Image (spheres, rainbow, N blue to C red):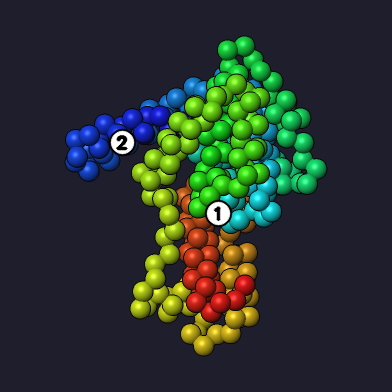
Amino acid sequence: MNMLGKVIGGVVGLVTGKWPIVIAGVLLGHQFDRGYAKYAARRLPANFVPVAFAVMGHLAKSDGRVSEDEIRLARTAMHAMDLDGDQTRDAMNAFNAGKSPDFDLDAALGRLGKPANLETAIGRQLIELLLPVLLIKDEASRAERRILWQVCEVFSVSRVELAQMEAASRINRQFSGHAGPTTADGPNAANNAFAVLGLNADASDKEIKNAYRRLTNRYHPDKLVGVNDDPAALEAAGRKTREIREAYEMLRKRRGFK
């Protein structure tokens, strides 16, 4: 989850003012980050993954509901950490457990311990995992900010470090193509949206909702866990799920239903 290499590579490229160099810098930085992540993972507590995803689930639920985007972020993070099928299932179970109203954040963080010289490193790894949950929204809620700062306090990460990490995460999202919504809106957008949902343009609001639920249930990446854990298949399922969600959201806004 480390992003330092991509950020430095991208910034160096921006100084040149040439986009090919920017892209090359980000790609080289990405290779550095992957190597660093594997090195850091060997030094983290053995229970880091389940605890981290439980906290992620708690953070996602803190504003009242867990969105499809937040679930997608969790799945993407699991893939980035090279978790196998069993580890992915355990991480997803932990994520769901974190959504429970009686989830004890202090107890969960305490289970990670504070190994000598690794206290801040653990906190940074955890914060890098959590930050995307905040950044997919226009503005983070007070509850989300409070949880993130609680993590910082436990692992001795300063407010200045947190601000720097948040800025780096924002840059990383921009370079990765996740800076904002991807739903296009134009003359043929509605027709395309109906086609994605397998409907005619005269479909009722209820038919739109039913098609969205049916297709989301069919294509969601979670359906592949334990059946087909191939990263390419999971990525394709994620793209299809996003396409379905974007089509539904556009039609919902145009029709004005909830």
Where does the image place residue 55, in percent across and percent down from the top left?
66, 38
- Disc 1 residue type? Asp
- Disc 2 residue type? Gly
Which residue is pictured at 50% across the width and 77% down the height?
254
Which residue occupies the extreme bottom position in the image? 202
Disc nearer the start of the sequence (1/2): 2
Q: Are marks 1 and 2 in contact (CB under 8 Å)?
A: no
Quadrant of res 117:
top right
Secondary structure, mark 2, is helix
Q: Which residue is under mark 2?
A: 10
Which residue occupies the extreme right position in the image? 102
Whether residue 46 is visible here, answered yes or no, is no
Which residue occupies the extreme top position in the image? 116
Which residue is pictured at 60% across the width and 40% down the height?
145
Which residue is pictured at 43% across the width and 54% down the height?
180
Whether residue 105 is visible here, answered yes or no, is yes
Local crowd size for mark 1, using a 10 Å CA cut-off: few (<14), some (14–19), many (≥20): some
Q: Which mark is residue 106?
A: none
Local crowd size for mark 2, using a 10 Å CA cut-off: few (<14), some (14–19), many (≥20): many
Q: Is residue 123 left or right of residue 182?
A: right
Which residue is pictured at 42% across the width and 79% down the height?
191
Where does the image place residue 256, in percent across and percent down from the top left?
56, 77
Of residues 233 and 123, the one nearer the viewer is: 123
200 vs 64: above or below: below
254 vs 173: above or below: below
Where does the image place residue 249, in percent across and percent down from the top left?
52, 68
Quadrant of res 33:
top left
Q: How many marks?
A: 2
Q: Which mark is residue 69?
A: 1
Q: Is residue 224 left or right of residue 29?
A: right
